[in-house]
Image (spheres, helix red, strand yellow):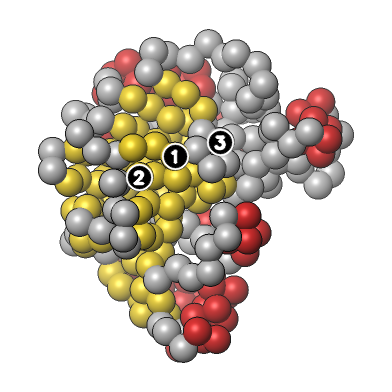
């Protein structure tokens, strides 16, 4: 069976934020309902699997789900909350004596190579620009606006007529950037805030208000929000569009017709 499992569902700082004593960060420290690791997900076809993004919580995630090895990783962009676990993964590959496969657009691979030059000793760097296939999924990527942080990449997956997109870090997409979001069975979208009041030029990820407008436009059958900051209280019933829910650690989604 094809499944998508959410591992991390937090924004770049995770929840709780180290410096913060707000109600949600405090709750995250106490009961943990709002505790969120940096965004990452696991795709499995029942036999093979791959992980999307490898942030600083990668090691912790692996321990929590009791998984000992990852053969393949797909990376959206080279921000630390999406790649800071790569050196640990490379070390694990070294100890296992098996090279891992890292897939990303060429320029992301170059950025990663500059940051961690030793990585390619233990990991095969594979370009994903013109499309790849993993676990039977035909995977394409495209550049998406990431606001003040530049841009990220989104991935579209297709298999047996089922189509879904993973787009954790984007804001205010252009018409061109929205095109691959049409006709989806599932859209996984990063929404850092319920409503972010900071000045637009300082922002980098959709808030839930803007996301609702995007969903109304591209009409996926189902949507799941991830990459959520300490602004989002998952204990509360939020006013979300029909067919939309919040991701949570360990949540398993069937990705199949
Ligand atoms: Zn991010
Ligand atoms: Zn980012």
Q: Which mark is residue 248?
A: 3
Residue at the spot of label 1: 252
Q: Earlier in the sequence, mark 2 or mark 3?
A: 2
Apparent side of residue 53 relative to residue 157 in the rendered image (left or right)? right
Work out whether 54 lies above or below 37. below
**Nearer the camera: disc 2 or disc 3:** 2
Please tell me which residue is depicted at 53% across the width and 11% down the height of the picture.
Answer: 239
- Crowd class of label 2 (few under 14; some 14 to 19; many from 20; radius 10 Å): some
Residue 31 pos. (x, y %) = 78, 33
- Quadrant assignment, res 108: bottom left
Image marks 3 and 1: residues in contact by CB distance under 8 Å: no
Residue topped by disc 2 = 3
Q: Residue at x 56, y 36 (%)?
A: 248
Give the SS element for disc 2.
Answer: strand
Q: Residue at point 43% right, 30% down? A: 224
Q: Are marks 2 and 1 in contact (CB under 8 Å)?
A: yes
Whether residue 196 appears in this view of the structure is no
Residue at image coords 59%, 22%: 194
């Amino acid at each position: 069976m094809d499944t998508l499992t959410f591992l991390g569902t937090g924004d770049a700082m995770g929840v709780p934020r180290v410096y913060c004593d707000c109600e949600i960060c405090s709750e995250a420290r106490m009961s943990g309902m709002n505790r969120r690791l940096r965004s990452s997900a696991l795709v499995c076809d029942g036999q093979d699997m791959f992980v999307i993004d490898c942030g600083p919580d990668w090691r912790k995630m692996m321990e929590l789900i009791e998984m000992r090895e990852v053969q393949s990783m797909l990376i959206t962009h080279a921000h630390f909350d999406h790649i800071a676990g790569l050196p640990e993964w490379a070390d694990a590959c070294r100890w296992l004596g098996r090279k891992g496969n890292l897939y990303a657009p060429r320029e992301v691979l170059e950025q990663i190579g500059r940051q961690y030059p030793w990585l390619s000793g233990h990991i095969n760097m594979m370009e994903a620009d013109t499309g790849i296939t993993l676990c039977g999924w035909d995977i394409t990527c495209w550049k998406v606006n990431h606001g003040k942080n530049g841009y990220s990449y989104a991935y579209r997956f297709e298999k047996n007529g089922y189509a879904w997109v993973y787009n954790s870090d984007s804001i205010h997409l252009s018409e061109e950037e929205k095109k691959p979001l049409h006709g989806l069975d599932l859209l996984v979208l990063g929404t850092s805030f319920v409503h972010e009041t900071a000045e637009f030029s300082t922002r980098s990820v959709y808030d839930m208000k803007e996301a609702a407008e995007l969903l109304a436009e591209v009409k996926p059958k189902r949507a799941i929000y991830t990459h959520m900051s300490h602004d989002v209280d998952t204990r509360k019933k939020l006013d979300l569009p029909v067919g939309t829910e919040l991701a949570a650690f360990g949540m398993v989604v069937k990705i199949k017709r």
